[in-house]
Amino acid sequence: MRLDRYPKVYFGPMSKNIVDTLLDMSNKYPIGFIPSRRQVEHDGGYVNNWTSEAFFKYVKSRSKSSLVCRDHGGRLQGQEIDDGDESIGKDSLIGYDIIHVDPWKKFSTITEIAQETSRVIKLCLSINKNVKFEIGTEEAIKYYSHEQLDQFLGLVKQELKEQFESVIYAVVQFGTKIIGTKNVGFFDKNRAKKMIKVVKKYDLMSKEHNGDYLSEKELKDRFSLGLDAINIAPEFGTFETTALIEYFINNLEMEKLDDFFDICYMSNKWKKWIPEINKFQNFEKSKFYDYLICKVSGHYIFSTEQVAKWKTEDLKIDVFLKNKLKKEIVITLQAVY
């Protein structure tokens, strides 16, 4: 019933090029966007400096069928420490199609998390009765078993009563997570089956986070188990960054490449993905880490003044990047649909 309306894959809007490439494909494939609060926020974000409203209007002006969904909305999920109510309230007012309510960073017990999740959903529905929700969290934030997921969903349903109908997704955990540019951990097939079974018990759809860097077979295997949707975010930001590095090398623009590394390094955004790197030990090793640091953090600085200047001076850069992105994204979409 619900599967006809909602996409099977949701993408992080890591850059304007990625957003534009996906929108160009939205007439053929169902597309969902999942901006985090750091990427797109009511007072601006690092992706194209979009506000929540500006991003929503941009997507809907290009493709009314594409869904705009808040990823990890709520407490402690923004750039600043807050309760998330202002951000999530404005998402509701703007008309975001789905809001992921995720207070799992703040609270420790399933009961507390269920209560806060229910409170936020009620708040959003008081602003916009049509908004839909995703609940639960990814393993990198807080692990839970299928029994704990069952307990959580049961408590939220009990608290929300008829308003539980506005919940459409529950986050399932399969044992994988992202480190650097790899999907690591162990894909637990039995755990996946149990998680999906719990979600279906509540007449919800299952959604896995951290679907990045998976092979076509790995993606297909997940959906063959009954998974309904998956999130992919940093993968294509990393891919676009790699393509930009390739462009600089192909055109012998090594000074720009060096400047690009410096901007990436000084941003400190790479520390989230490769925290074990503290300093470079020698020249040979530093060249390897220069490249790795750029790969994992390049998308954070695409909207900086320097990168924007390079693209203004050389219009061929974005053409090259979009062509590369289209080929790579099509592979993922074809594996899922």
Image (cartoon, grey):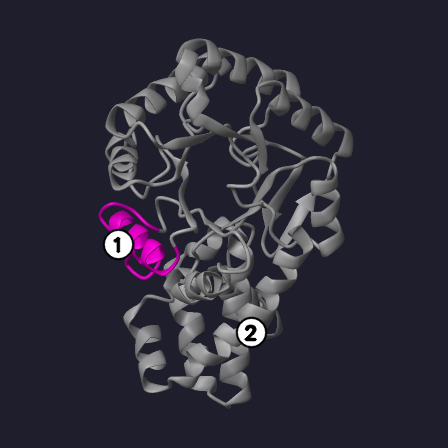
Q: CA distance from mark 1 to mark 2?
A: 26 Å
Q: Quadrant of residue 60?
A: bottom left
Q: Is residue 90 left or right of residue 226?
A: left
Disc count in the image? 2
Q: Is residue 225 left or right of residue 56?
A: right
Farthest residue to the top: give it. 158
Kind of residue at disc 2: Lys
Give the x, y percent position of residue 1: 57, 32
The image's mark for residue 295 is none
Q: Is residue 259 magenta?
A: no
- Kindly tell me whether residue 244 is visible in this rendering: no
Q: Which residue is mark 1?
A: 54
Give the x, y percent position of residue 102: 43, 30
Q: Is residue 193 left or right of residue 212?
A: right
Mark 1 lies on a secondary structure that is helix
Q: Which residue is mark 2?
A: 324
Mark 2 lies on a secondary structure that is helix
Foreground residue, 310 or 325? 325
Q: Is residue 56 magenta?
A: yes
Identify which residue is drawn at 47% across, 85% down: 254
Give the x, y percent position of residue 174: 67, 35
Image: magenta residue range: 40-63
Foreground residue, 181 or 102? 102
Identify which residue is drawn at 48% across, 61% down: 22
Identify which residue is drawn at 42% across, 25% down: 166
